[in-house]
Amino acid sequence: SSSSADRRFVWGIRSVDDLILRDDTSQRLYALSDAMGSVTAVVNTGGTVQERYGYDGFGTPRYMTAAFAYRDSSSYDWETLFDGYRYDLPSGLYQVRYRFLHPSLGRWLNRDPIANKGFKLWGLYLGEAFSELRGTRSTWTRVHSNLYDYATNDPLLLYDRLGLDIGVGRGILSCISDCSQACEVAKKRGLDAGDAGGLVCCNGQLYACVWDTSGATGASHSKAREIIGRCIQAHEEDHLPFSFCSSLQTGLNRPRAPLFGRRQAECSAYLTEALCLMNGLADCGGDVQCLAEVRTELAHVRGQIEEYCGRR
């Protein structure tokens, strides 16, 4: 009947499940995590590995000694494991706030409570962000139709911290400490998906990026590229009020596309870009090639305005 705490935990800022250390009545252990937040080892205060952990695709844990020898169970009764979730040994389930994850089945035990409340379109805007990360245009409606699947059956890339809201891991697609180079790092990691510009989330903050100043029409003149790059920047900055980064995501990733009003957002951004290009014609200083390339880009943008706004 003691009122003293049996265990104490210290959490980090990389995610809501970012465990730093655990104190119990006998010792302090530090958690070492991989890119998805799964605890892979615990070390003592001297930095010596005490125990290691491995997982199958959906989190069934394997316990190992410091030398990677198999153990039947954890010698430290370690409960924070796959993706940083709390593992309940008697039931073999992960308690992930709104739902329980069954790692052997790779499924939630109960249906998605958000979808049950009628928000089945929840996956549509994340689907676009997911497609951008993959560089594909997959059919998200098909993927998200199963209200019991965990992270759309892609646990190597995605997680679900609440049992409600899929997020992107902080691994090869994220891991960044200095957001001042967010756009450059996003380009190197392929997050641009071939786009001339776009938005990225860096540690929860939005950044407007320009990755290709040649635009959609392949401008080569240096002054024309400068003008086109400036106008792509204006286009992306116009998107900022309509986009957001998940508060549970850290690292570097693409933001979610808006659930509603995407066409209106694109219409507004292309109108901004067109106005910028028209004003930029004066900066060509009468150079024939510069004028031709900026006008060609402007014609393309006007075509996009017709598509998204219904007018030129």
Image: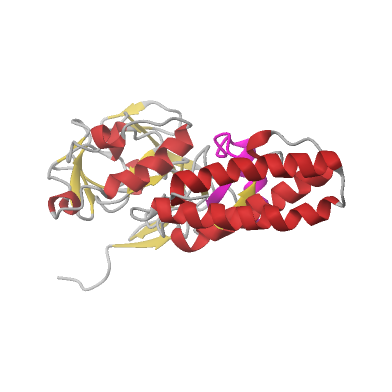
Q: Nearer the viewer, residue 244 or 263?
A: 263
Quadrant housing residue 19 = bottom left
Query: Where is residue 104 shown, x and y percent of the image?
Result: 20, 31
Query: Where is residue 83 shown, x and y percent of the image?
Result: 36, 44
Q: Is residue 184 one of those drawn in magenta?
A: yes
Residue at the (42%, 27%) spot, across then down: 68
Query: Where is residue 135 shown, x and y percent of the image?
Result: 48, 31
The mark tally for this picture is 0
Is residue 225 visible from the viewing direction of this image?
yes
Q: Which residues are magenta?
A: 180-203
Q: Is residue 32 one of those drawn in magenta?
A: no
Judged from this view, the residue extending furthest toward the front is: 312
Judged from this view, the residue extending furthest toward the top is: 69
Q: Nearer the viewer, residue 298 or 70?
A: 298
Work out which quarter of the rendered image holds the N terminus and state it: bottom left
Quadrant housing residue 247 = bottom left
Q: Nearer the viewer, residue 30 or 240?
A: 240
